[in-house]
Amino acid sequence: MRKLAAALVGLGITFTAFAQGGHEHGVARLQVAIDGGLLAVELQSPLDNLVGFEHEPSTEAQRRALADAEARLRDFGALFVLPAGAGCVLSEVELESPWHAGHDEAHDHDHDHDHDHDHEHEHEQDHEHDHDHEEAHGEMHVRYLLNCATPEALTGMTVKLAEAFPRTARIRAETATPRGQNALTLTRGKDKLPL
């Protein structure tokens, strides 16, 4: 994950703008950068867009919804379509969820979505009030790093996030590529992001 963070910084992607941009239900933020054969993508979304709630999961159905959302977010090809001619291969995914921060389970979710959550259950009530400030602003952050054999073929990307997560009405996208920088808003009917 350090490699991914270093690559994003090297590509000029800084996400402080996301943090300062505010938290808006129905709106996700997307940043895409291309440098040589590297393609870096950063997605930030309120949990409400992804699972319908932003508080710490308290029922089995909520825990399952969160695990399902995390699994879908790790599947780059289900959310983003790149030109086949670019020959891009996903090399790294980093997912940050507020309900796994600081827990060993965060890394286990990369491989095992049926992981035993007894530890979290034991501490739910203890942490309930500690997370009150986070509940109003629960967000998911996902970073993807891809290696592309023919980066000049990366002329655009189809973003299917609103299809996968229907509560997402708009995606504010920013790009930094050899063709320049751009910003636009995507919707379910306007899902093509020029690169």
Image: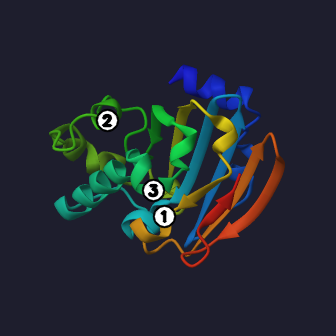
Identify the residue position indicated by label 2 in the image: 110
Check residue 160 in the rendering and tell me which mark sits there, or answer none.
Answer: 1
Horizontal side, residue 14 vs residue 145: left or right? right
Task: Say which amino acid is labelled 3.
Answer: Leu
Establish if 169 lies above or below 145: below
| Other-residue count near label 1 (Cα within 10 Å), few / some / many at <14 / 14–19 / ≥20 | some
Disc 2 to disc 3: CB gap under 8 Å: no
**Residue at 26% across / 62% down in the picture?**
62
Mark 2 and mark 3: Cα distance apart in space = 17 Å
**Residue at 56% across / 27% down in the picture?**
4
Q: Position of residue 137 (x, y in %)?
A: 55, 59
- Residue at the bottom extreme? 189
Task: Say which amino acid is labelled 1.
Answer: Lys
Can residue 165 be seen at all in this image of the molecule? Answer: no
Secondary element under disc 2, as helix, strand or loop, is loop
Q: Position of residue 37 (x, y in %)?
A: 64, 29
**Which mark sits nearer the N-terminus, 3 or 1?**
3
Mark 3 and mark 1: Cα distance apart in space = 5 Å
**Which mark sits nearer the N-terminus, 1 or 2?**
2
Q: Quadrant of residue 176?
A: top right
Secondary element under disc 1, as helix, strand or loop, is loop
Mark 1 and mark 2: Cα distance apart in space = 22 Å
Q: Marks 1 and 2: which is nearer the front?
A: 1
Task: Say which amino acid is labelled 2.
Answer: Asp
**Which mark sits nearer the N-terminus, 2 or 3?**
3
